[in-house]
Image (cartoon, helix red, strand yellow):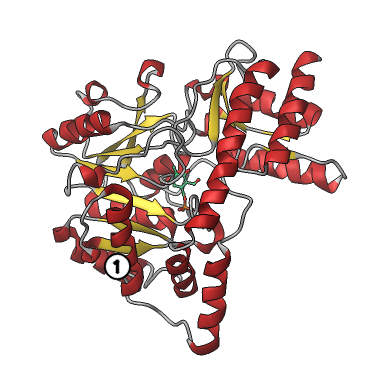
Amino acid sequence: MRNSTRSEVDPFIVMDVMEAARKAEEAGRRIIHMEVGQPSTGAPEEAQQALVRALENDALGYTVALGLPALRERIARMYGEWYNVDLDPGRVVVTSGSSGAFLLAFTALFDSGDRVGIGAPGYPSYRQILHALGLTPVDIETAAENRLQPVPSDLSGLDLAGLMVASPANPTGTMLNRDAMAALIGATQEAGAAFISDEIYHGIEYEAKAVTALELTNDAYVINSFSKYFSMTGWRVGWMVVPEDHVRVVERLAQNMFICAPHASQVAALAAMDCEEELQANLAVYARNRQLMLEGLPKAGFSKIAPPDGAFYVYADVSELTQDSRAFAAEILEKAGVAVTPGLDFDPVRGATTLRFSYARSTADIEEGLSRLRSFMENR
Ligand SMILES: Cc1ncc(COP(=O)(O)O)c(C=O)c1O
């Protein structure tokens, strides 16, 4: 049968690494996972208990498309607690993870063929989802001196209908500070384009607090998720904040595309928002791991790295070691038993000379992984 051309999206290369790692584990090897972008912890205990209680007396049918009112209110309250932003709960849309929010945002904002700017390196699915929706992803090659984030001058002449940013970003962990975010919002709005801010790694930040676009403007789409800080990847629940006059547009799309985000996950997510102690304990593990990575990677020979402001990744320039990050990642897996992600997933052009190391797992795993990387590099 025929296929559409817009369905021809690239696979995640990291999935190939994960499959190779799985095969090695099946053959009895112990693999250290520095490729995965998810916490090894589960949903907070109280979130799980809240769902157990709900299962006893609730059929957990559809919710309204915009999400459980109590969850929308709690998310709005969080903006007051975290950023001192007074947010109307009516602007919060609960989604099936941030991935569901991308579909809603791109569909609500753009027409077929519209050009949408994304930073390279960046999260690969932005490009693939835009392509699948018949939109045109425009890679913005970011500069090391801008900490691999886009800056206003990068936008000139691109004729964009929208700009997508992430802070903290995947794969670099770098953040846009208040001035940098304000400058990008200004330049985007001046160009008549829509500003979309992926804030999925908020809460996982180390030196300074991440800035939400909502501190600077109401005229933006802000996307977030329960997957990372709240440690609920598989529950498929996230949210989006949209301008007041976009709520009805997004609601109609959500009704038709998803009906609602999973009800059970919304119940658990609501409870997760009051589990600060447990979530802060997870954060302390990432902070310790980050320190170990910043000390251990250079000792192993991966010295071209920048300290990440947030998230749980280190993006390394390995151009002095290889011109083929895919083959290098395969060699590291084979000889060191450490799974890492080739940069090609994040930057189709320059990613042949970069690797992403994730430190989302346990500290014991990070220590073991670093020690293996060191002996691998010594014997290379
Ligand atoms: C920057 C970024 N945005 C979005 C996502 C997708 O997350 P979700 O589980 O909320 O769909 C990821 C997942 O790794 C990510 O790194």
Q: Residue at x 44, y 31 (%)?
A: 309
Q: Residue furthest front?
A: 277
Farthest residue to the top: give it: 320
Residue 351 rendering spot, x and y as whole percentages: 52, 24
Q: Quadrant of residue 334?
A: top right
Q: Secondary structure under badge 1?
A: helix
Q: Nearer the viewer, residue 271 or 236?
A: 271
189 is higher (above) or lower (below) than 1:
above
User: Disc 1 beta carbon < 8 A from ligand 1?
Assistant: no
For label 1, the residue is 73
Q: Is residue 236 visible?
A: yes
User: Residue 369: which quarter of the image?
Assistant: top right
Q: Position of residue 75 (x, y in %)?
A: 33, 61
Say what amino acid the circle numbered 1 marks.
Answer: Glu
Q: Position of residue 185 (x, y in %)?
A: 20, 36
Residue 18 location (% of width, % of height): 68, 43
The residue at the point 74 percent across, 21 percent down is 374
Q: Nearer the viewer, residue 58 or 209?
A: 209
Q: Residue at x 17, y 49 (%)?
A: 218
Residue that appears at 87% across and 45% down? 27
Q: Is residue 218 above or below residue 62?
A: above
Q: Residue furthest bottom?
A: 57
| Apparent side of residue 272 relative to residue 335 in the rendered image (left or right) | left
Q: Is residue 95 above or below residue 366?
A: below
Location of the C terminus by quadrant is top right
